[in-house]
Structure formats: structure tokens, C-alpha cells
Image (tube, coloured by chain):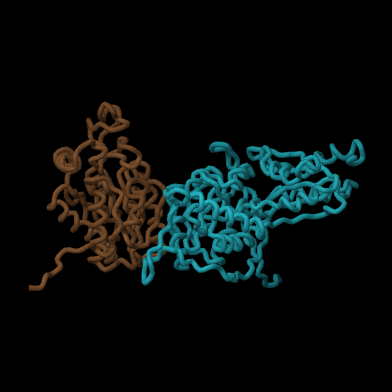
């Protein structure tokens, strides 16, 4: 007989949707695209009965602007898409940054460039971590590695968005979105957050509120940018999320995020069993990037290997963090290819075995 | 004998002098919007959307909560606002480049969904802010910065009749085209603008759109008086005034 449990078996996409509902998502706007359609389907079924808003927009461009409107009124709001759709949203993401509006956006990445394919990918790392649209701005980028973590980070994303008045992007991929795993939804408690006294709700008993991104007067836009940058420095100081294992004595450090971090951990396990001292670092926040811990780990002589489902994007941040202290190598596959545990082990063994370890 | 004040600035219209060119129609249209808001007593529950274009600074002149948005996206942003705050009165103020060109999809689909919004669409047949380029609503033979030999149907297409286009959609609740080229026309325009807001106040279904033919003497290369005549003689035959829906 099965014991009652609060664990449920869900796809990553459904878990993201359910977590968003539990975190108080008031309005969702989205456009169909594979491999994230379970998300829109789940929210279309579950939001309206709760008296909350679901709109299938005419395009991703419209979806992100609907998010802009809902957020401007102070509502918790989200849109989700996959790579080509996220490209279309870049205009809106820039405006959200300029207007300092909170939003949650999930990118269930697929292969590119162009229409690409519907296989999983991590090739939107540059776009996500560098802002993506025009102007100097950032998104907080969170990369889950499991269905459980997809749910947990989605709840966190809404709080971070409100705290810093900026977009938080959940950067996932087609495998994590579509695979099923058991998930337990933590009880959501809304932390104390700054009041949304900037929201447009009708100027009742107060001066008008204006949500804007245009600053024409000389020096104004530079001041606005300085304020944004000061905020981004606060985010960098407070919101780095990272996990690491078996680093202390490691000669080889594999750095990977999301789905690839699971393969990296499995590879480290196999390498250790074979006598190779390997360890792993998993950035959870891709921006802000855990540069400090990577830089500290690099103070010992080691070899870094970054593994990605791309032609080499996060590896550039790893190189910046390592700062020339150690060699940083890369292994990746693109266009829907997924580096296997065997391939990752092989990459390290190639380095480790001939000489029996690094010199 | 006591003097009675019979004409005053609507409180929703701020005291700021506008940045508009002499003879521009935006000032009149702003005033009509402000009057409508005050006539209906909805200033404290109205949220406006400013476009990209000459009216981008509309929030400097209209004393209501306002959102300035990306070029053409006002109806999408307004959808987001109205859906989460259905008890608020939400209006978009857009020009012809904004609404009929780059934002064609957004206005088409907001109308198609029947979003209960009020859209003030100011058609002056030209891009003003960027220096007088051809708009979808520029008339045939009209000389602009990007149709220096005059607009030709076989090269640039015919002027786009937005009100007619949207009126056929079931989601359009009320569509009327008005002008601001004469005192009589302005009085008609006032009634239309008030009605477009009032429908939203009364929760009547569908999107309300007022297309306002408005002069741009600067980029029509005319005096303000010539521009008013050109509007009546050249624009009105292409864009007939009147109620198309509702």
C-alpha cells in the first residue's frame, strides 16, 4: 500500500508553472513554442479557475509587453518561451530593465541559431547573462539542474524580481523542461519586500506615477544608468548561488550548469572511482556569476574543464574568474547534442592518464 | 455684476507648456482627452499609455498615472494592465507610425480579443518625431522625407484606412473617425472621445478606437492655416469622417 506523500511526479515545465502559481503569479502571458508548451498548457488550465489572468498573446513581442503592463500595476507576472521566442522578447527585456519593473521570464532553451531545432541546448548563455537587448543592463539568471530545483528557484525568482525591481530569468533547457521527476513544493512564504509605491494604479490621493524609460534632459540618463549599476553591484554582492563538491584535493575541476552539471557530477564520481582526483562546481546563478569561488579554487594548481551544451559560452566567464591562474579547457556539443558522462570522463582521462595526473 | 467662469482648463491637463510645434493637433487632442476624463470624473482611476513618437511625453501634460512603452506596443501593455486591473480605465494614445506601422499586430490583436480599452489614434499622415518620413497613412502624392517624389501606390502602397480595417472585427465595440480642423469638427471629436471613455466606464464590450485626423504643419511644410485646409481637402476624402462601428 502506498503511503500518502506530498511528492508528485511532474515535468520540469509543469513544476515551474505550479511553483509560479504557489508564489502568487497573478498574470501569465505567453505564445506557443516547443519545448515549453506544457507550461502554457498548465497555466491555461490552472490560472483562470483561481481568478487569475492567462492570455495567449499574438507573439512573444506582445507577451513581454503584456508582462510590462501587468508588472507596471504591481502584479506578479511571468512569461515563458524557448530560444527563438526569447530573442523576440529582447526589446521588452531592455524596457523592463530601464523602467525597473519586476518580471519572471523562463527560457526553456532549444538549439539555434535561427529556427534551429527542438532539442535541448545551452546556447543562450551569452544572451541571458549579458542582458540580451540594447543598453547596459542585467538579468538575474538562475539555472536549475533538477525538476525540484526548477520549482524552488521559480519561487525564489519572484521574490528576487520584486526585491530588486528587475527581470529574473530561469534558464532551463528542453530536457529539464520535459523530463519527469518527483518534486515536493515547499510552502511559499512571501518575505518582506519593498512596497510597490511606484506602480500605476490610478492616481488616487497621490501625485501621478509615471513608468518610463526615456530620459532626454542632459545627464539624466547617465544618472539613471549609475543607479542601475549600483543596484547590479548589490545583486552581485548578495545573490551569488553556487554549489561545489570534492574540490579540496581536486586536480581537475569540472564547471557546468543545469543539465550538464548532473553529467559533470556523474563524471566526477566515475573519475574518483578510477583514482583521478576530480571535483565539480555548479554555478546556479549565472548572473551574478560565482567568480569569487572559482577564483579561489584556482589559487591551487588544477586544470579546469567547462562542459556545456554549446560551442563555449560560460567558459569565457570561467576563464575571467580563473584569471590565468590555471588552464581552462572546454568540452561542448551544440545544436541539440548532449555531452555524455562517458565523453566528459574521456576528456579528463585524456589529460590525466598519460602522465598520471597534472604536473 | 459678477463674472462667471464659463471656460477653464480641465484639471487633468497640467499647466506645463507643451513641446509641440505651432499648429500641431496634439495639444487639442490632449485637451479633449483631459476634458473627457474630467467630465466623467475618472482621473483617479485612469491609467494612460504614452507612445513612441511626438506624444511620448504625454505624461508631462496629462495628470494621470501613465506608462511610456516601446514603439507600437501600447495595446499589448494596455492588455496587461486592463487584465489585472479591470476596474481601471485604460487608454492608449498612439500616432500613425506607432499604431498603423510598427504596432499593427498589437492593435489588430487587442481589437480582435475585444480588450475593453480606449484607443486615441492620432493620424497626421507622417512620422513627426523622426523628421517627416512617410507613414502608412501618408496620402498618394504626399511628399515626405522618404517619399521625396511623392507617394506612389505602385511603389509604396495606398494609405492605410485603419478605422475601416479594425471596424470589421467583432472585437471592435466602437470605432469613429473625427478631425480637429475646425471648431465644429473639434466639438464632434470631443463627443467621440467622451463616448470612447464612457463605454469603458460602463463596462461595454469591445475596444473603442477614435481615429483623429490631426495637422502636422511642420512636416507637411505648410502654415498652420494651410494645414487645416489640407486636412479637410486632402485627408478627409481618403479618410472619411464618421462613425464606423457602435
Asked where in the image residue A248 lies, by quadrant, the reply is bottom right
Q: Is residue A28 left or right of residue A336?
A: left
Q: Is residue B91 left or right of residue B240?
A: right
Q: Which residue is painted at 45% across and 52% down in the image?
A: A213
Asked where in the image residue A117 lies, by quadrant, the reply is top right
Indicate the position of residue B75 as horizontal and vertical percent values: 36, 52
Q: Is residue B34 left or right of residue A319?
A: left
The total of numbered circles placed on residues is 0
Say which of A333 and B138 sits in front: B138
User: Height in image: A52 above or below B176?
Assistant: below
Indicate the position of residue A338 as horizontal and vertical percent values: 69, 42
Q: Residue furthest right?
A: A356
User: Height in image: A258 above or below A155?
Assistant: above
Q: Is residue A255 visible?
A: yes
- Which part of the image, by quadrant, shows the C terminus of chain A? top right
The colour applied to the residues of chain A in this rendering is cyan
Q: Which residue is painted at 31% across and 32% down in the image?
A: B145
- Which part of the image, by quadrant, shows the N terminus of chain A? bottom right
Say which of B114 and B216 sits in front: B216
Asked where in the image residue A243 lies, by quadrant, the reply is bottom right
The colour applied to the residues of chain B in this rendering is brown
Q: Residue furthest front?
A: B1
Q: Is residue B235 visible?
A: no
User: Height in image: A300 above or below B45?
Assistant: above
Indicate the position of residue B129 as horizontal and vertical percent values: 34, 42
Indicate the position of residue A256 as horizontal and vertical percent values: 72, 48
Amino acid at each position: 500500500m502506498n503511503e500518502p506523500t506530498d511528492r508528485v511526479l511532474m515535468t520540469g515545465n509543469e513544476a515551474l508553472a505550479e511553483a509560479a502559481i504557489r508564489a502568487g503569479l497573478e498574470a501569465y502571458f505567453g505564445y506557443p513554442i516547443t519545448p515549453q508548451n506544457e507550461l502554457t498548457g498548465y497555466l491555461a488550465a490552472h490560472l483562470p479557475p483561481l481568478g487569475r489572468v492567462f492570455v495567449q498573446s499574438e507573439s512573444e513581442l506582445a507577451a513581454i509587453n503584456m508582462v510590462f503592463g501587468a508588472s507596471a500595476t504591481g502584479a506578479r507576472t511571468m512569461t515563458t518561451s524557448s530560444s527563438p521566442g526569447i530573442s523576440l522578447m529582447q526589446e521588452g527585456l531592455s524596457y523592463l530593465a530601464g523602467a525597473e519593473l519586476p518580471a519572471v521570464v523562463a527560457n526553456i532553451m532549444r538549439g539555434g541559431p535561427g529556427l534551429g531545432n527542438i532539442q535541448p541546448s545551452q546556447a543562450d548563455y551569452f544572451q541571458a547573462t549579458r542582458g540580451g537587448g540594447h543598453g547596459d543592463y542585467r538579468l538575474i539568471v538562475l539555472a536549475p539542474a533538477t525538476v525540484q530545483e526548477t520549482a524552488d528557484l521559480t519561487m525564489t525568482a519572484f521574490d528576487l524580481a520584486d526585491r530588486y525591481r528587475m527581470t529574473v530569468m530561469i534558464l532551463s533547457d528542453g530536457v529539464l523542461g520535459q523530463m519527469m521527476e518527483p518534486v515536493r513544493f515547499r510552502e511559499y512564504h512571501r518575505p518582506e519586500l519593498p512596497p510597490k509605491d511606484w506602480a500605476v494604479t490610478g492616481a488616487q490621493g497621490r501625485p501621478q506615477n509615471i513608468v518610463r524609460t526615456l530620459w532626454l534632459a542632459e545627464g539624466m540618463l547617465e544618472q539613471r544608468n549609475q543607479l542601475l549599476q549600483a543596484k547590479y553591484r548589490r545583486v552581485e554582492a548578495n545573490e551569488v548561488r553556487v554549489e561545489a563538491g570534492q574540490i579540496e584535493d581536486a586536480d581537475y575541476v569540472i564547471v557546468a550548469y543545469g543539465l550538464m552539471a548532473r553529467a559533470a557530477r556523474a563524471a566526477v564520481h566515475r573519475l574518483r572511482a578510477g583514482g583521478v582526483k576530480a571535483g565539480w562546481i555548479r554555478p546556479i546563478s549565472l548572473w551574478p556569476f560565482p567568480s569569487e569561488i572559482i577564483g579561489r579554487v584556482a589559487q591551487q594548481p588544477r586544470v579546469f574543464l567547462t562542459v556545456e551544451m554549446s560551442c563555449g559560452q560560460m567558459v569565457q566567464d570561467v576563464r575571467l574568474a580563473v584569471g590565468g591562474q590555471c588552464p581552462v579547457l572546454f568540452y561542448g556539443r551544440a545544436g541539440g547534442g548532449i555531452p555524455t558522462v562517458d565523453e566528459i570522463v574521456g576528456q579528463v582521462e585524456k589529460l590525466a592518464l598519460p602522465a598520471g595526473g597534472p604536473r | 455684476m459678477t463674472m462667471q467662469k464659463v471656460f477653464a482648463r480641465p484639471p487633468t491637463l497640467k499647466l506645463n507648456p507643451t513641446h509641440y510645434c505651432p499648429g500641431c493637433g496634439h495639444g487639442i487632442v490632449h485637451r479633449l482627452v483631459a476634458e473627457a476624463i474630467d467630465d466623467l470624473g475618472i482621473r483617479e482611476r485612469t491609467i494612460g499609455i504614452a507612445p513612441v513618437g511626438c506624444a511620448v511625453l504625454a505624461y508631462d501634460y496629462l495628470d494621470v498615472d501613465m506608462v511610456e512603452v516601446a514603439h507600437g506596443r501600447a495595446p499589448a501593455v494596455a492588455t496587461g494592465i486592463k487584465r489585472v486591473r479591470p476596474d481601471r480605465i485604460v487608454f492608449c494614445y498612439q500616432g500613425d507610425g506607432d499604431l498603423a506601422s510598427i504596432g499593427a499586430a498589437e492593435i489588430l490583436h487587442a481589437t480582435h480579443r475585444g480588450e475593453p480599452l480606449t484607443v486615441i489614434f492620432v493620424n497626421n499622415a507622417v512620422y513627426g518625431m523622426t523628421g517627416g518620413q512617410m507613414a502608412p497613412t501618408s496620402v498618394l502624392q504626399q511628399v515626405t522625407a522618404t517619399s521625396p517624389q511623392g507617394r506612389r501606390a505602385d511603389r509604396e502602397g495606398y494609405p492605410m484606412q485603419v478605422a475601416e480595417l479594425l471596424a470589421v472585427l467583432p472585437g471592435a465595440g466602437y470605432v469613429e473617425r473625427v478631425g480637429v480642423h475646425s471648431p465644429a469638427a473639434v466639438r464632434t471629436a470631443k463627443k467621440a472621445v467622451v463616448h470612447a471613455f464612457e463605454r469603458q466606464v460602463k463596462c461595454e464590450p469591445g475596444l473603442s478606437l477614435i481615429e483623429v485626423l490631426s495637422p502636422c504643419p511642420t512636416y507637411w511644410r505648410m502654415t498652420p492655416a494651410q494645414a487645416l485646409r489640407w486636412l479637410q481637402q486632402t485627408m478627409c476624402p481618403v479618410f472619411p469622417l464618421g462613425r464606423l462601428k457602435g
